[in-house]
Amino acid sequence: MKQVVQNYKSGELTVLDVPVPGCKPGGVLVRSAYSLISTGTELMKVSEAGMSMLGKARSRPDQVAKVMQSVATNGVPATYRKVMGKLDSYTPLGYSLCGVVEQVGAGIDDVAVGDLVACAGNEHALHAELNWVPKHLYARVPDGLAPRHAAFGTVGSIALQGVRQGEPRLGEVALVIGLGLIGQLVVQLLTASGVRVVGVDPDPVRCGLAERLGAVACGDPASAAVEATVAELTDGLGVDQVFLAAGGDSNQPVELAARLSRDRGRVVDIGKCRLDLPWNAYYEKELDVRFSRSYGPGRYDPEYELEGRDYPIGYVRWTERRNLACFLDLLARGRVDVEPLVSHVADFDDAVETYRLLKDGGLKAVAVLFRYPGRPDRAGEAVAPAVAVPAVKRRGGGAAAPARAAGAPVRLAFVGAGNYATSMLLPHLTRRDGVELSTVVTTTALSAANAQRKFGFAGATTDLDAVLGDKSIDAVFVVTRHSSHAELTRKALLAGKAVFVEKPLALTEDELAGVLAAVEESGNDRLQVGFNRRFAPLLREAKQRFGARRGPAHLRYLVNAGRLDHGSWYLRQGTEGSRFVGEGGHFIDTASWLLGADPVSVYAVATSGNDDLHVVLRYPDGSTATISYVTTGPSGFPKETLDLVADGRALRLDDFVRASVYDGRRKQWVGSRLPKARDKGQSAELAAFVKAVRTGGPMPVPLESLVATTAATLAVPAGLAGGVPVTPAEAR
């Protein structure tokens, strides 16, 4: 299928061939009929992409701060790969469309194949022929409403949420600053609510349009006529609400809002304009400044948007989905008219030229629509589809992979192509002789296309079953979100593939048991978990210098994990497990490797909220390991420090940059690397895995050790709950 994309590094816009997205549970696959270009938000993004690297940095200081923190934590090379990987990738455009339901995912019963729906979301309602849309980001289109009008659903919801934040009442007077697409809709919604509206915009054409759509009067922000109209309508008291629907760097909108508001009036920010509030003006009138967050309650909440958990109507009357349905109803009943806003309708194939005309000013527009091949007519009856949706394939398991021909390359498939895969794994594999990147599988079509372009995969798809059924593929990498690791690993093992799964292997004991059952059923134990630290060159040399132990040892491992950004999927403990269950296997595996055994008991304590953990592991020979996993440490402190003491000797590791071995009263050995060359073992781990697949030799880490580490990690929550040492499930 085709999708409009942009490369943020080069600014290139193109219509790209990408795989058809999969129809996941909890949502529907929608074939686009019309999608709407946001002439404000999207053109701002297009303009940013055309800036120099310095200009991009100046426009996003928040991202620059994240880059500097990543340099301190991960070093320059890893950070550079991560940043350039993000910049030199195609990103999607679009967030408002109308289309026909093509497939219905499991758990969906409110729409059927062939229904016409309006869709929202900058990750789901894209300028693409097909989109997967979760339940709370679509709404059925009322009978009789034209698809081209229903495509305004998202921007209409944004305007509607802004109006709700202003709490308009019959007879009040409102000022709308900025009469672009959102501003024009706000004018109509306020008018439909019985509010008299004055509009402000420097463009006389937009002012005239707003007056035709219900505004009492409109004018230039510097015009005395605007102030005179406000004075006349309010008896000189000022407007009840001001809606900031303008963009740009000028502070004029917030200054005008203060001047024309009444005492204790409401100022609602809907657009993205400068907000240097003049303190005296806002203080003296005690103005109520409010922000309107996109489409309404639920926006940016993954449990609502992606997991389908609705807010009870008794507590949250208007969610983003209810706003979407409400706006469609207003359109269907003629209370809002979007046809006068449509400046241009372009064929989807002409998308690049359309953006160019908009950016260069050759096309002056309030709203522009893309129309797609095979779009439905006004009755919602779909024309024959132009893009085939692959059928879901079913396949039995248990078949072993065929013997590899001597000298043939190891053919790898990747399931998942997120930040870790593209910055820490794939760059090492693309440089390795004897490796062929066969297929990349993702649920998002564009991420698969990006990985294929950057790393040279022979194919890209969203169909996992097709990859598992491909007998020419030797090994499968599972690099997806934690909740899917165990099931994907189980399927790949049953398909006879060697499997490299990023940590964790499982989130529960039942998931771990399922993986082991797949090993037993298939006879395939070709499994490696991404516990890379035991492969770090500096740590391996330090262990060799330390030498063999005679007596028990004590190991202390401090992990300065730091706080997670708000919205990080790591915080979704209900679906993705706790943060330690996701990451802790790294540190338990490292301790067990250094101590040469698997733990036999786990004791854990935590601070309030379980943010900071202290885990004590006991080993068969009496050795102990204490792992302190903290999130409250300073960002400038090393992320990982480790000490091992036994037999009058000590080993110290400082963040994979410096290592020391002490014997008696003197340092026996010191090893160091430049911080920018910090190596946590990914390259060596991948080399060992590829060699094992190529030669048929043993996996880099015995299965028993992988299972023991996973079981010990899973024992930590039980230990926290009980307050006593716990025996890991696999050691009982």
Image (cartoon, rainbow, N blue to C red):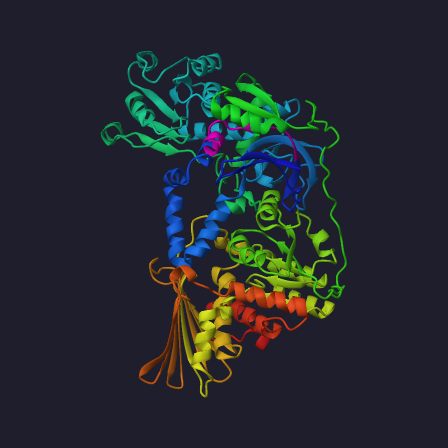
Return the x and y of residue 434 as percentages of the image width and height: 64, 61
The residue located at (49%, 36%) in the rendering is 11
> Which quadrant is the N terminus positioned in?
top right
| Closer-to-camera residue (253/353) | 353
Q: Quadrant of residue 614?
A: bottom left
Q: Relative to 94, is 503 above or below?
A: below
For residue 410: magenta?
A: no
Eyeballing the image, is 460 above or below 687? above
**Could you tell me residue 373's position as x and y percent?**
68, 28
Instruction: Indicate whether 57 appears above or below 527.
Output: above
Toward the bottom, the furthest residue is 550
For the question of whether residue 602 can be seen, the reply is no
Res 626 seen here: yes
The answer to whether 30 appears left or right of 196 in the picture is right
Residue under the image location 58 percent in, 63 percent down:
506
- Residue in the foreground of this view, choosing between 732 and 528: 528
Q: Position of residue 637 (x, y in %)?
A: 34, 62
Q: Is residue 220 left or right of residue 576?
A: left
The span shown in magenta is 31-46
The residue closer to the viewer here, 318 or 23, is 23
Quarter of the image with the C terminus is bottom right
Residue shown at the point (34%, 20%) measured from the top left: 239
Q: Is residue 288 left or right of residue 395?
A: left
